[in-house]
């Protein structure tokens, strides 16, 4: 012990400033400290320059404009909103609209991408070539052009609402509940009553129970080789909400589009605007083309011998895909899939091309032009997209770590 203490004392006493550059033990830390100081100095200089220029122009950074009346209408709002609402409420409407189209787009793009990726590997020549044409067409044309093209198609499609009115109006409604007109899609609206919270809890419990049963089936198969049936998971997923729905009668109901209440327009239900439909479709099919390539690459990354070995054990093709191919392909698919979800969310900022009121159109568009608060609005936009992107990355990385293969 005495020798070690003496050695440490000798090293500390022999330390020289020149070792910060010449000694490899300290050189990396030295340059990192210098880089950090330069960044802090640069940011401080930019901040002081901004404040000095704003003061010279008689301006300052203030968010008091958020309490002022917005004075403009929004065509699609998930919360109550009028032109007399504040700019803050207009920004919240924009945030909810962005999250709505991002969520719908990610789900639909995943379905399209997985389907196209699997079909592109089909042995059917026509199907594989059709999927190749779809992927190459959408990947090599900018997303803004696809948004404008699909927006134009959606805008000119659909008939006048009066076409759905008449002596036998319900005969024109798709499934008796949907009507696509030149104003948008009329669809049933969900209305909540007393006891709706218990139905919502039943839905959540059903979803959790679905995945827990699937996990139990997989764990039992790997530990004992016994294959349990998977149908109870669907019974849990559907049965619990159905039981809660009938137990709390009237807690959840549907408001159907009424074609008899008015001679000039369809009443009841909810109207999904055409800008939302156009942006949703455009982002879904565009991002789906990239996801298809990720899925195809993930499946091809699995050795063909794995499939042949599973088939030799007597497993059917569907079980080979679910138990052998997909678990190994997911570790290749998930990381680029995270990037595609982020791209879709950020591409939703092009919504103004079809007139959809997302956060960029409300806070970064009309509010910015009315108030002239460019710095405040842009900072809020940057903060919003940063939080959303980091949240998506965190959630998907957690999922990626769950599905990653664990090596001993």
Image (cartoon, helix red, strand yellow):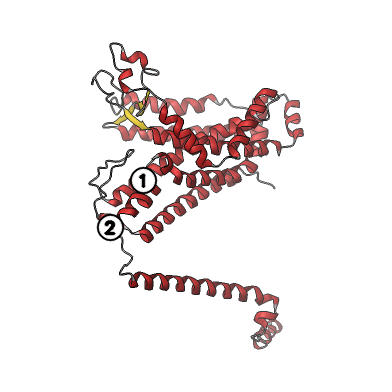
Mark 2 secondary-structure assignment: helix
Residue 315: x %, y % from top left: 69, 25
The residue that label 2 is drawn on is: 65
Q: Nearer the viewer, residue 227 or 172?
A: 172
Residue 234: x %, y % from top left: 49, 26
- Identify the residue at horizontal 57%, vertical 40% (top origin): 141
**What's the mark number on residue 94?**
1
Query: Label 1 crowding class (10 Å Cα cut-off): few <14, some 14-19, many 20+?
Result: many
Q: Which of marks 1 and 2 is nearer the N terminus?
A: 2
**What's the mark number on residue 27?**
none
Q: Nearer the viewer, residue 314 or 296?
A: 296
Q: Which of 355 and 67 is in front in this view?
A: 355
372 over 217 or under it: above or below: below
Residue 361 appears left or right of 166: right
Q: Quadrant of residue 322?
A: top right
- Identify the residue at horizontal 55%, vertical 42% (top origin): 142
User: The N terminus is located in which quarter?
Assistant: bottom right
Q: Quadrant of residue 317?
A: top right
Residue 361 appears left or right of 311: left
Q: Nearer the viewer, residue 244 or 311?
A: 311
244 over 138 or under it: above or below: above
Residue 266: x %, y % from top left: 28, 23
Mark 1 secondary-structure assignment: helix
Farthest residue, direction bottom: 13
91 over 120 or under it: above or below: below
Q: How many labels does the image show?
A: 2
Decide if residue 322 is in sight here.
no
Decide if residue 324 is in sight here.
yes
User: Disc 1 to disc 2, how far (Cα)?
Assistant: 17 Å
Q: Quadrant of residue 353?
A: top left
């Amino acid at each position: 012990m005495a020798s070690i203490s003496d050695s440490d004392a000798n090293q500390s006493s022999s330390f020289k400033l020149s070792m910060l550059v010449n000694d490899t033990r300290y050189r990396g830390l030295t340059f990192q400290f210098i880089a950090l100081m330069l960044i802090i100095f640069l940011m401080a200089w930019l901040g002081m320059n901004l404040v000095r220029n704003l003061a010279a122009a008689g301006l300052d950074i203030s968010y008091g404009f958020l309490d002022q009346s917005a004075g403009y209408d929004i065509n699609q709002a998930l919360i109550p909103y009028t032109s007399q609402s504040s700019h803050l409420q207009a920004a919240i409407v924009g945030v909810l609209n962005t999250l709505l189209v991002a969520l719908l787009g990610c789900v639909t793009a995943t379905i399209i991408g997985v389907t196209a990726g699997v079909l592109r590997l089909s042995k059917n020549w026509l199907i594989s070539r059709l999927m190749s044409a779809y992927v190459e067409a959408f990947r090599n044309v900018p997303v803004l052009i696809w948004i404008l093209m699909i927006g134009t198609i959606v805008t000119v499609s659909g008939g006048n609402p009066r076409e759905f009115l008449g002596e036998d109006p319900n005969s024109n409604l798709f499934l008796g509940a949907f009507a696509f007109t030149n104003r948008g899609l009329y669809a049933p609206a969900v209305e909540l009553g007393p006891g709706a919270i218990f139905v919502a809890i039943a839905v959540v419990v059903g979803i959790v129970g679905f995945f827990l049963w699937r996990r139990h089936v997989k764990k039992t198969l790997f530990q004992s080789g016994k294959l349990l049936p998977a149908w109870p998971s669907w019974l849990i997923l559907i049965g619990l909400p159905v039981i809660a729905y009938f137990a709390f009668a009237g807690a959840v109901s549907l408001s159907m589009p009424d074609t008899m209440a008015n001679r000039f327009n369809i009443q009841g239900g909810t109207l999904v605007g055409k800008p939302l439909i156009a942006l949703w479709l455009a982002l879904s099919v565009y991002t789906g083309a990239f996801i298809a390539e990720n899925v195809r690459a993930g499946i091809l990354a699995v050795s063909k011998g794995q499939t042949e070995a599973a088939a030799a054990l007597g497993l059917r093709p569907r079980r080979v895909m679910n138990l052998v191919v997909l678990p190994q392909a997911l570790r290749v698919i998930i990381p680029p899939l995270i990037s595609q979800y982020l791209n879709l969310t950020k591409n939703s900022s092009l919504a103004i091309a079809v007139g959809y009121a997302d956060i960029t159109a409300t806070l970064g568009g009309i509010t910015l032009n009315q108030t002239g608060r460019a710095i405040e609005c842009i900072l809020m936009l940057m903060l919003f997209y940063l939080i959303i992107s980091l949240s998506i990355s965190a959630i998907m990385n957690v999922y990626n770590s769950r599905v990653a293969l664990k090596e001993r």
